[in-house]
Image (tube, rainbow, N blue to C red):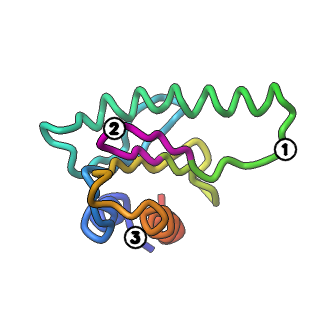
Amino acid sequence: MANTETALKEATTIIDGAIGAALVDYTSGMALGTVGGGKELDLNVAAAGNTDVVRAKVRTMEMLGLNEEIEDILITLGSQYHLIRLMRGRGSNGLFLYLALDKERANLAMARHQLRKIENELEV
């Protein structure tokens, strides 16, 4: 099992095109850990903003009566992918992994697969 820092470092090193990664508590909007981002992307701002995205989607699913779990949410920009993966499992309710990718260097299918693997190995 990996801790938060190790898991986020793994996400930014093994996933091609990774710009930055964060573990976020969507009940508070706070990033519990971040790696990368830099001048290109303020991960704390991204964590807070994407919390609103997750809350809106969860609320919409409830209103629609959908009895499904959200695996991930993809936001496609001109030059980036923003991938939000809601965490499941013991002790991880209310958390999501956030990954920003350079669209030209990333393989989205592989990034989703690798982020799922990182989630499974992460101990919160």
Counting residues from the N terminus, which is met first, the one under dot 1 or under dot 2? 1
Which numbered disc, 1 or 2, marks the residue closer to the eye? 2
What element does badge 1 sit on?
Answer: loop
**Where does the image place residue 18, in percent across and percent down from the top left?**
28, 57
Classify mark 2: residues with Cα within 10 Å, few (<14), some (14-19) or many (20+): few
Nearer-the-camera pick, 104 or 35: 104
Q: Residue at x 50, y 68 (%)?
A: 113
Q: Nearer the viewer, residue 12 or 109?
A: 109
- Which residues fall within the magenta stretch? 73-83
Answer with left or right where residue 83 lies relative to residue 57: left
Which three-letter amino acid code belongs to the residue tagged 1? Answer: Asn
Q: Secondary structure at mark 3?
A: loop
Mark 3 surroundings: few (<14), some (14-19) or many (≥20) residues within 10 A = some
Classify residue 7 as left or right of residue 123: left
How far apart are the two marked residues, 3 and 1, measured between alpha carbons? 30 Å
Q: Is residue 122 visible?
A: no
| CB under 8 Å between discs 1 and 2 | no
Q: Quadrant of residue 56?
A: top right
First along the sequence among labels 3 and 1: 3
Q: Amino acid at mark 3?
A: Ala
Residue 7 badge: none
Residue that mark 2 sits on: 78
Please name the residue that numbered disc 1 is placed on. 67
| Residue, disc 3 | 2
- Residue drawn at x 42%, y 26% is 49
Of the two numbered discs 3 and 1 in the rendering, the one whose residue sits closer to the viewer: 1
User: In whole angstroms, how far apart are the C-alphas of marks 2 and 3?
Assistant: 33 Å
Instruction: Using the image as rendered, state which of residue 63 and residue 24 is in the foreground.
Output: 63
Magenta-drawn stretch, dominant element (helix, strand or loop): strand
